[in-house]
Every structure is written in C-alpha cells, then in structure tokens.
C-alpha cells in the first residue's frame, strides 16, 4: 500500500500503515513484555531454585550481577525498543513531513521514556549507595532511611508514573486502523499485564500501579472515540486490543498474585519458592489467552455488520 504524503495537521486521520511497520511494532512490544522476566527465570528459577546463585548474586565491586546486567544490557536495549516504538507510531516514515502538533506529541513521548530511564538510574545509583553502607554495617539511621526511600519509593513512583503514561500516549495517538496481528495483540497484552503486575509487586508499589494503570483503559476509551465510536472498527485495532487486554489483565494479575501468595510478597524474597511465580505466570497467561480468544470470537461475530 503506498505511503501517504498527507501533511495535514490532523495526523490521526492518516490511515495508511505499511505492513513492515506493524511487523516491527509486534516484535518491539514482545520484547517489552518479556524482557523483564529475565529476573524470574535467571535469578529466581535458575539462581535460587536450581542453585546457580552466581548468575544474579555474584558481587562485582559490591553490586550484584543482576543489577549490572539491568543497567548495562536490559535498560539500553529497552531504551532503543521504546524509541523505535515512538518512530513507528509518530514517524516520520517514507515521504512524510510531520506537522508541528505531531512533533510536539513525539517530543512528549520521548520525554516520558527519558524520565522512565532516568528513574531506573536513580534506583541503580541508590542501590550502589545502600550496598556500600551495608558492607560497612550501616543498615539504619536517618541518612540510610532517606536513601532507601529515594531508591525504593521515589524512583519507583517516577518509573511507574511515566511508564503507564507513555503507553497510554501511544494508544491514544497511534494511527488508526492498525489491524494486523489481532491475536498477537491479545497475547502481548496479557504478557504486558503480567509483566507489570509482577514488576510493580517487586517494586513494592502495587497500589500506585493500579491508579496509574487506569490511564491505559482511559486511553482505550479515547481510541474508541477516535474511531467514531464504531465498535466493529476499533475491535480490529492492534493498540486497542493490546491496551484493553493489558489494562484489564494487570489488575487481575495483581489481585490474583495477592490471593495465591497471601500478600504482595516480592519474588526476589521467595528464595526456593520463587519457582511458584513462574508457574503462576504460565497458568495466568494460558488461562487468560484462551479466555480472551473465546471472548474475541464472540465479540468479532457481534461486531460483524
């Protein structure tokens, strides 16, 4: 399909989406949804359950390999992936010139992911500081408590605030009728919901995430409105399916986790029982996917004119 050269200030009306863009987007979202689970698989299953503790708990200059990997490998790749998502959504692509309003939206999206990465940097820096004090047998006191608050509370609030705002932004402003990969959108939405559910529990901020997570559902409502409130049209839309599944599955994942593990127990503190998180995740995804596919079949029939 030829690329539109329309430079109208109303960017959202541009309907022409190249297949290669949607294909790249699916891979990018898949990375976002899966990559953080390296902690559960490598640190939890291999490290604590199977006994290969050196994988994530080896100290290098007082900091675990887990934190070094997070800062030197996981986050740089995540930054690139989120940046590419912005390019796919906002452009410019071939033969396009972005209107000023679109450039502003793109700049704000870049700001959101910059703040998210910035907050993870705060977390890393304060982790080093806390490790250094623990090695000096300093694990209490006003200064330690303040640094711990910056590390475990402030940095996580900034992370989650801008993370959910970023994805809500993409859901609202992606080009309409990106209808390729409907089941992949559902599957990645479930993965995304599970990834964030476990992530915010590990970050000890499940309640703030429930608040920020409502932005995803609000964004889906706005996207439905942008589709002129036509359900048959919006239900085919990739970002609507992904966002709706993400927005619903995350709170369900958080509440299910609370019930199964008798509270918001951080996976990193479970020691030999951390394998249960892997099993929980697998059951959650399988149950959610087959339920969503069944619901999709019903809604697709309902939406046919």
Image: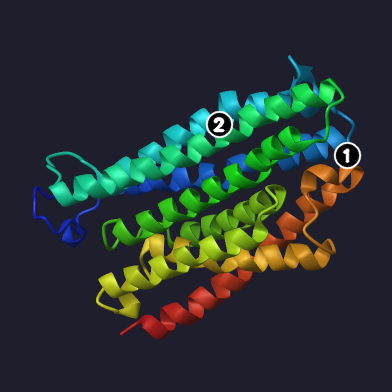
Q: Determine the CA span between mark 2 and mark 1.
A: 29 Å
Task: Name the secondary structure under disc 1.
Answer: helix
Dot 1 crowding, Cα within 10 Å, few <14, some 14–19, many 20+: some
Q: Is 72 rendered above or below residue 176?
A: above
In this rendering, position of residue 184 left or right of residue 201:
left
Q: Which residue is mark 2?
A: 121
Q: Position of residue 139 (x, y in %)?
A: 83, 32
In this rendering, position of residue 40 left or right of residue 186:
right
Q: Which residue is mark 1?
A: 49
Is any part of residue 83 visible from this angle?
Answer: yes
Q: Residue at x 72, y 23 (%)?
A: 65
Q: Residue at x 52, y 61 (%)?
A: 212
Task: Name the secondary structure under disc 2.
Answer: helix
Figure quadrant of residue 268: top right
Q: Is 290 rendered above or below residue 146?
A: below
User: Viewer-proximal residue, 104 or 304?
Assistant: 104
The disc label shown at residue 254, or none? none
Q: Position of residue 204 (x, y in %)?
A: 70, 51
In this rendering, position of residue 239 left or right of residue 99:
right
């Amino acid at each position: 399909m030829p690329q539109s050269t329309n430079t109208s200030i109303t960017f959202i009306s541009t309907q022409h989406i190249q297949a290669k863009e949607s294909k790249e987007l699916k891979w990018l979202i898949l990375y976002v949804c899966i990559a953080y689970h390296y902690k559960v698989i490598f640190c939890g299953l291999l490290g604590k359950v199977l006994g290969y503790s050196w994988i994530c708990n080896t100290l290098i200059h007082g900091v675990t390999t887990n934190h070094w990997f997070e800062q030197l490998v996981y986050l740089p790749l995540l930054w690139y992936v989120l940046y590419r998502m912005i390019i796919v959504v906002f452009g410019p692509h071939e033969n396009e010139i972005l209107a000023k309003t679109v450039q502003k939206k793109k700049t704000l999206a870049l700001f959101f992911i910059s703040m998210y990465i910035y907050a993870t940097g705060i977390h890393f820096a304060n982790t080093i500081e806390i490790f250094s004090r623990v090695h000096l047998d300093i694990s209490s006191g006003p200064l330690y408590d303040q640094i711990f608050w910056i590390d475990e509370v402030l940095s996580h609030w900034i992370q989650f605030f801008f993370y959910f705002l970023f994805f809500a932004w993409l859901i609202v402003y992606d080009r309409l009728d990106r209808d390729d990969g409907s089941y992949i959108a559902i599957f990645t939405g479930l993965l995304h919901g599970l990834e964030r559910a476990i992530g915010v529990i590990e970050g000890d901020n499940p309640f703030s995430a429930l608040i920020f997570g409502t932005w995803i559902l609000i964004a889906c409502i706005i996207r439905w409105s942008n589709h002129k409130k036509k359900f048959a049209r919006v239900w085919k839309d990739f970002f609507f399916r992904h966002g709706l599944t993400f927005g619903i599955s995350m709170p369900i994942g958080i509440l299910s986790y609370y019930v199964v593990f008798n509270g918001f127990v951080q996976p990193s503190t479970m020691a030999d029982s951390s394998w249960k998180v892997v099993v929980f995740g697998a059951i959650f995804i399988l149950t959610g996917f087959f339920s969503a596919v069944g619901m999709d079949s019903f809604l697709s029939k309902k939406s046919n004119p």
